[in-house]
């Protein structure tokens, strides 16, 4: 099962520390404790708080975390019955030196530019017997909104083309229309999360997105409901990493 989809309703969410306060409030009302991220000092300011840049859940109780921010998350998450593993590769300012942990997941496979994947993360992905699907795109997690184990939404054509050929269910949408400060636009994967097996979280509204109806129909096709965490336009906040912790 995809670790980005909690097997029970999430009670913990790792969220960008600079996200809209309304997102934090909405998650709290849903009974979810929010762990805000800290700023990574070496990557571009547009993604400096993004959780999917600095960590990856290998499975439902194991996270691999970039070494330079590991102490903070070790402190915040140490009592949550999670296994926390320090990655090896430190992140740097420019692409592709900032993509080591931004790995996409679908069913029993991972998708990334594995030339730049953190070696420790790659070891644990292989230990899970996951198929490694190599692609030139490095921001694969933030480019993929995970709807269920076999279904995603993306605006990245190479990801779409690769996954369609492998038999996955993929909705290709127009790029843009998603806010990301300091960049022209953000990505649908970075704007979403999974509260449970049946509920998709979106950071904001889709009203200005030309593919709004396609997106909502695709989600409904797989019997999922959508919760908007704010009334603002949808924004890329580096994914909402939802966890279920005892």
Image (tube, grey):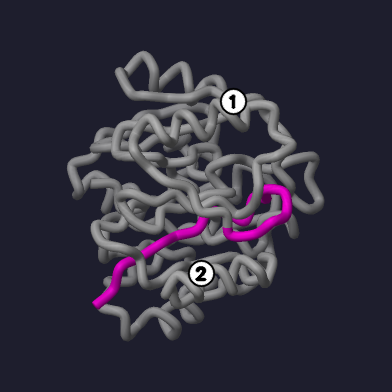
Q: Quadrant of residue 228?
A: bottom right
Could one spot residue 20 in this view of the protein? yes
Residue 21 to residue 5: above or below: below
Q: Above or below — where is 192 with respect to 114?
A: below
Tell me the residue at 56%/74% (across/down): 36
Label 1: element kind: loop
Residue appearing at x 26%, y 61% in the figure: 8
In the picture as drawn, the residue positioned furthest to the top comes out as 165
**Sequence order check: which comes first, mark 1 or mark 2?**
2
On the image, numbered disc 1 is attached to which residue? 173
* Separation (CA) of disc 1 from disc 2: 27 Å
Residue at 60% over, 50% down: 98
Residue 78: give x, y in percent of width and height.
35, 83
Q: Position of residue 234 (x, y in %)?
A: 67, 48
Residue 131 horizontal side relative to residue 144, left or right: left
Residue 235 in the magenta stretch? The answer is yes
Report helix, strand or loop for mark 2. helix
Tell me which segment is drawn in magenta. 229-246
Position above or below: 37 against 74: above
Residue 27's mark? 2
Residue 97 percent coordinates (x, y): 60, 48
Q: Nearer the viewer, mark 1 or mark 2?
A: 2
Query: Horizontal placement of 60 versus 75: left or right?
Result: left
| Image quarter of the C terminus | bottom left
């Amino acid at each position: 099962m995809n670790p980005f989809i909690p097997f029970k309703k999430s009670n913990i969410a790792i969220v960008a520390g600079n996200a809209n306060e309304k997102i934090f409030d909405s998650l709290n009302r849903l009974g979810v404790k929010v762990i805000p991220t800290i700023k990574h000092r070496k990557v571009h300011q547009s993604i400096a708080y993004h959780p999917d840049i600095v960590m990856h859940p290998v499975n439902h109780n194991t996270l691999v975390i970039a070494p330079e921010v590991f102490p903070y998350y070790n402190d915040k998450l140490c009592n949550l019955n999670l296994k926390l593993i320090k990655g090896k590769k430190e992140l740097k300012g420019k692409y592709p030196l900032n993509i080591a942990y931004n790995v996409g997941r679908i069913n029993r496979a991972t998708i990334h530019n594995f030339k730049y994947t953190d070696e420790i993360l790659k070891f644990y992905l292989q230990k899970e017997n996951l198929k490694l699907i190599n692609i030139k795109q490095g921001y694969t997690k933030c480019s993929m909104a995970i709807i269920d184990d076999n279904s995603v939404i993306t605006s990245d054509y190479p990801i779409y083309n690769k996954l369609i050929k492998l038999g996955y269910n993929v909705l290709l949408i127009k790029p843009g229309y998603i806010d990301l400060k300091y960049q022209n636009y953000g990505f649908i994967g970075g704007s979403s999360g999974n509260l449970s097996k049946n509920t998709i979280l979106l950071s904001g509204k889709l009203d200005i997105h030309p593919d709004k109806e396609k997106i909502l129909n695709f989600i409904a096709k797989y019997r999922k409901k959508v919760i908007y965490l704010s009334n603002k336009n949808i924004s890329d906040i580096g994914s909402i990493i939802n966890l279920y912790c005892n």
